[in-house]
Image (cartoon, grey):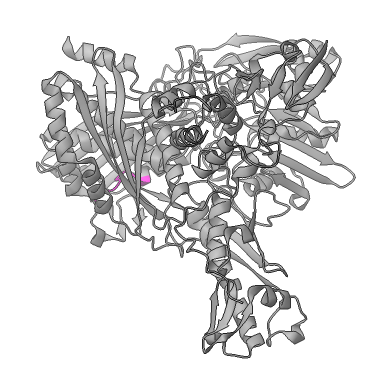
Amino acid sequence: MNISLRVNGRPVEAVVEPRLLLVHFLRERLRLTGTHIGCDTSQCGACTVHLDGRAVKSCTVLAVQADGCDITTIEGLAAEGELHPLQAAFQEQHALQCGFCTPGMIMASLELLGRAIVPDDREIRAALEGNRCRCTGYQNIVAAVRTACERS
Amino acid sequence: MRRDAPPDLIGARVPRVEDPRLLAGRGAYVDDLQLPGMLQLDILRSPHAHARICELDVSMARALPGVVAVYTGRDLAQFLKPVPSAGGMQGFNAPPHHVLAVDRVRFVGEGVAAVLAQDRYIARDARELINVTYDVLPAVTDPGVALTPQAPVLHDDIGSNRAFELRIGNDTQAALAASERIISGRFINQRVIPGPMETRGAVAHFEPWEGRLTVWLSTQAPHLMKREFARYLDFPEHRLRVVAPDVGGAFGAKNNPYAEELLAAALSLKHGVPLKWIEERSEHMLATSHARAQAVEVHAGVRADGTVQALHYRLTADMGAYYHAITHIGPMMTAALMTGAYRIAHAATDIISVFTNATPTDPYRGFGRAEATYFIERTMDLIARELGLDVLEVRRRNLIRPEEFPCTTPTGHVHESGNFQLCLDRALERFDYEGTRREQARLRAAGRYLGIGIATHAWRAGFPSVPGGKGYVTSGWEKSTVSIDAAGKIRVVIGTSPHGQGVVTTTAQIVAQQFGLLPQDVRVIHGDTDAVAQGNGTMGSRSLVVGGSATLLAAQQVRAKAIRLAAHLLQIDPRQVVLESACFRDAGNSQRGIALTEVAAHAFAGPRDLPDGMEPCLEAAVLFEPANFTTCFGTHVCAVEVDVQTGAAAIRRYIAIDDAGRAINPTLVEGQIHGGLAQGIGQALMEGASYDSAGQPLAASLLDYATPKASDLPHFEVELTETPSTVNPLGARGIGEAGAIGAPPAVVNAVLDALAPLGVRHLDMPLTPQRVWRAIQEARA
């Protein structure tokens, strides 16, 4: 099938099998390998990207479903060669260790930024319900998201 | 000439230099690698825990367009040896573990056939086309049942499910008999899954015209893997390169040369093409090492005041169906550290290790030591309860005192140094132990159940080489090479293989400190056996204790040489040279000095321009072998409230006071403790890899295996003490495993303390709401 979409602001046209997952399309066809695969059951959130401005798990979206959509991956966030404030907060608060869940964590928590009221820790923890990390114990991730929210 | 002195880097909260590329999505994990013409390897796995393979028909899979080859276990046994284990090499009764099952499967998830295809979708299609007929056999996954005469036997050649039996310790019989009282209990440290976020994976690339094989592997020990892959494949080691690219967590589970990884390398050699194998999460839950899976029957001989006179364990350890790399070491480590932080004159463990129709076990953060700590800390609470004493008092009475180090335990372990009281006192002060006890009484009067749990943990890190160990996960040394380039910047090559610990940053801190440079002036290279000549890897909290010590010693040697050269250039005595802020100054004349950049450039000159006998280049390589394990210790204390209506346990406060010996970067140390706590609390309350009576795993995905989410965990209060270790020049203590070791007993002790008024005396992990609620109902009935 033919699909045409925008990925990180750039137009992309491709012919894909209907069963091809968006995450495989991004990783293997477009070589955007910052989006990771951590599970087969949509539990871990490592594959989170933005589809038309909303966080989705790209392992449960078919590439053909993204036809006509606007996709942002982790690579699109620091496009100008400078870390996005949320990425910078992750470094500052030591919110990553192995880094495997990190792109998904960042894409998922991006939605919390720019709100009128800064979320408290309990709200941030609840908002990260769909993303798992095995390294950090989440404390510094929560701190990083809070820090970025306070600054946004 | 002088510039502003950089801050003291030892103890500085330097942001990680590893982070920017990982944050920008520019990390390079093994699945991110794509090579031209690369094939995909996929494994068909057994759906049965124990079965004979009657028929295995791969013809339809072979015929599928895009499929290059399909192999069965029998095919591979023609040209591949069984998978190695250190247990087998050390003379333990190791049953053959074939790369793919030959005629018989022994756990759900054991590989049965392998497909090599053009891409992962075709490989998957082909896998579905393989027809296997099984004759299902009775299975046993409970190690206790596996020891009974009626149990199905996994390995016919061994004749029973006993892997090995071993006694570690001194005589306990007489001491127990002479004790005022014997207190007995039974504790289980359940089977869990390490579960790094990145599953296993390998890319193998044999280049026939170069005679070179490269294996990119999600591993914590590339050098160990290089040695083992070469031995296994009979491939010349000097032509084999193993690369650990970015690794998405390991926790002990990526320290084993796995069957699938060896197969990937073997098939790349055979087919002369690059190929990739990436494990799915559902495969990971079945086929990557599980861990813990130990149970003890405890007999403690005590005095009425709580002093422990003798301790005996009968330890049953579940090996799973086969040995992985160091499966057999787990129960031995538990036995060696059974006395925990306490002075107990008589102690021994009788180990019975058992094969079961379950996934093989192997290290997981706190290997052997988490189990030992759980058993002794639960025992301490049991003793207190039985004697009607405060849990704190029993601990205080038995703790090894600061003046008693070095302290040899009855199981032969030497605690080199420590100050266990320091952590305990600080934890209680911060927790307000007395105040919280009063709060507990108030809440109880109001029908609310708050419990307090304490764990005073003491264990060991940074193992020395094992005599007679033949180098398979038994070499305790580590190597670092420090070299200064002509511009005065530094390159450090380290033999450990960090994958989240932040060792690149701490290494840069250690080295930069020696020269008055900044961390960004130091580049750290690791993980590629072509770039790093020798090393062992990252495991057992050794990266800083052992690897960091090699780095420090190498940096000091280079520093001493640079000072001699600077003295030569300044025409003064080396003892007169002061090195500060990357500048060598004449102590006798502060106007005279020479920059590190100049000295570094000069070091590349010919020998005639150097001091007599000095070789060109500012470089040193040091191999550090620790004289003994480093003792690691701390106190964890937590308050947990149990909702008796639902059985849910909520951690109200968690305080971890751990001794870092010397914290090079406290932020990273705290991060390590946070992560360990999450895993320890996960084990205490949520996680468990259990099986049904047919040997079917009940947790085969992240849907049904509960690794903690952000909302499952509390805010941790972590604080460090620094009591320098005596067995490494940094004075550092292992810290990577402290959280996973301390948390399970602290949390379980707290829950049982909360439930004590309801008459609940015992619970086994995980303390899920259902399990807790049932115990409350049973106690009430």
In the drawing, does residue B738 fall left or right of residue B28? left
Q: Position of residue B625 (x, y in %)?
A: 52, 61
Up the image or down, B611 lies above or below B442; here it is below
Most extreme residue toward the front is: A116
Q: Position of residue B307 (x, y in %)?
A: 15, 46
Residue B320 visible to the viewer: yes
In the rendered view of the protein, which quadrant contains the N terminus of chain B?
A: bottom right
Which image quadrant for residue A86? top right
Up the image or down, B777 lies above or below B415; here it is above
Residue B708 visible to the viewer: no
B339 drawn magenta = yes
| Residue at 83% from the left image edge and 10% from the top image edge | A1
Which image quadrant for residue B488? bottom right
In the drawing, does residue A65 fall left or right of residue B299? right
Front-most of residues B738 and B666: B666
Front-most of residues B179 and B432: B432
Q: Position of residue B640 (x, y in %)?
A: 26, 28
B650 drawn magenta = no
In terms of secondary structure, what is the magenta stretch mainly? Answer: loop
Residue range in magenta is B336-343
Front-most of residues B653 and A86: A86
| Residue at 41% from the left image edge and 58% from the top image edge | B662
